[in-house]
Amino acid sequence: MLINELLDDCLLAIFDKINNLDDLINCYKVCVKWSHLIAVRTKKVKYFMAKPAKTDFSTDYVYCEGRYRIDGTCLSLLFPNLIIVQFSMDFFFGVNFGDVVTFFRNLDSLKGIITSSREEIEKYCDKFEMLSTNFIEPHFLHNCFSLKQLHIQNAYHFIKRKSRFFPNLERLHIDAFDSFPDRYYHGPVLTKLKILELALYSNSDSAIYVFQFMDSCPNLQSAHIRLNSHRFFVDETLKHKFLQDLVIDFNRNNQIDWNNLKRLIMKYPNLKHLSLRSTGSIKDEHIEQLVRILPNLVLLDIFLCPGVTQKAADFVTDYCKRYGRSLKFYFDKNFNEIKSDWPQLSIKSEKIGRAFDFMEHCFLKDFADLPHFLIPIASTFHSYCYF
């Protein structure tokens, strides 16, 4: 039997397994029948990525890593339902830039881009709700009011100074090598921010103000902070009642002052999930204090902290029995158990998390592995309608 004698459903099942853009376009050019079936397959695509996914081979994405010239009109015909596009230099080699701009302007479904290209695609589209880039130029700020998710590098001070241009941000991710010296935040209140992810690096002994910046995010629910400074400003008079998930990675800093850290943790009395990582300054006795001052805690993860031993684990077990607490405690010795106890928490590296869920897609991961975007599910986040 010739392959073209297969039923359409069989051919579609085969085409659904193809994620490479070049392969799909080559199949599209075979004949009229294949052109029709490939168009049916590509209408399912929501994510256009620069590289193949390592673990996800679903039909809702394709990738382009070749250097073959692509007809820009073909993009509009084959991919009318794209939500996210990731651009690489190879992509711009293969597609006329004007065709890309036209494609963007006519694509109502498009909500975000991932790009490190010098071709400033983002300035041509003021409808984006998600942007991942290595830079934001000042002239682009007037296009940022619609942004709900921003993933950026080396722009910590810039974002703090220009925060008024991002009033609708719900998730902010900054990997900030330019973060010192840090300064007190005097900007507007970011009322819609729910998730904050910041990595701050210092070669100095200056204090950081990231937690004071968090005080200006009154509805913040989750935070993933990486820092290598042992000095941080804490305003203990302000309590943050909505923060439930907190990860602090001290980047192997062993000079953390416990009393200062305790004052910080006490700002967040309703924490449910807490992870403290990579410091030798946390000891067994500090775990006892954390359990007592955080009555709603259900997951306590202390990773790469050699000062925490089985003694702390035994205390948590005994404390929970005596006071009827339901609290899971993990440290270096039993850390692998967290994967079986919380199977819904992802540890895989992914560009896109398919749910606006910090716990599922961020809590267990290193800062470098956090997704560029978290795609909300329409049934739970009605302001987004991507599914």
Image (cartoon, rainbow, N blue to C red):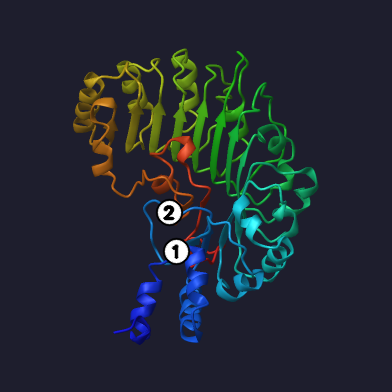
In the displayed structure image, the side of residue 66 where residue 93 appears, left or right: right
Against 297, residue 31 (above or below) is below
Q: Amino acid at mark 2?
A: Ala
Q: Amino acid at mark 1?
A: Asn
Q: Classify residue 217 by image quadrant.
A: top right
At mark 2, the secondary structure is loop
Which residue is at 50% across, 25% downward? 264
Q: Nearer the viewer, residue 178 or 264?
A: 178
The residue to which callout 2 is attached is: 53
- Label 1 or label 2, whichever comes before in sequence order: 1
Circle number at residue 289:
none
Front residue of 116/82: it is 116
Task: Quarter of the image for the N terminus: give it.
Answer: bottom left
User: Which residue does the numbered mark 1 point to in the structure image?
Assistant: 19
How many angstroms separate mark 1 from mark 2 (CA)?
A: 9 Å
Kindly indicate whether the residue at mark 2 contacts the one at mark 1 (C-beta within 8 angstroms). Answer: yes
Neighbour tally class for label 2: few under 14, some 14-19, many 20 plus, Cα within 10 Å: some
Q: Residue at x 64, y 41 (%)?
A: 134
- 135 in relation to 24, above or below: above
**Frontmost residue, 234 versus 310:** 310
- Residue 371 percent across, percent down from the top left: 49, 46
Residue 127 figure quarter: bottom right
Where residue 207 appears, as percent x and y from the top left, is 61, 18
In the image, what residue occupies the spot 28% across and 36% down?
Answer: 327
Element type where label 1 sits in the image: loop
Q: What is the x, y in percent for residue 239? A: 53, 32
User: Do we see residue 114 in this rendering?
Assistant: no
In the depicted structure, whether residue 231 falls above or below residue 90: above
The residue that appears at 35% across and 82% down in the rendered structure is: 9
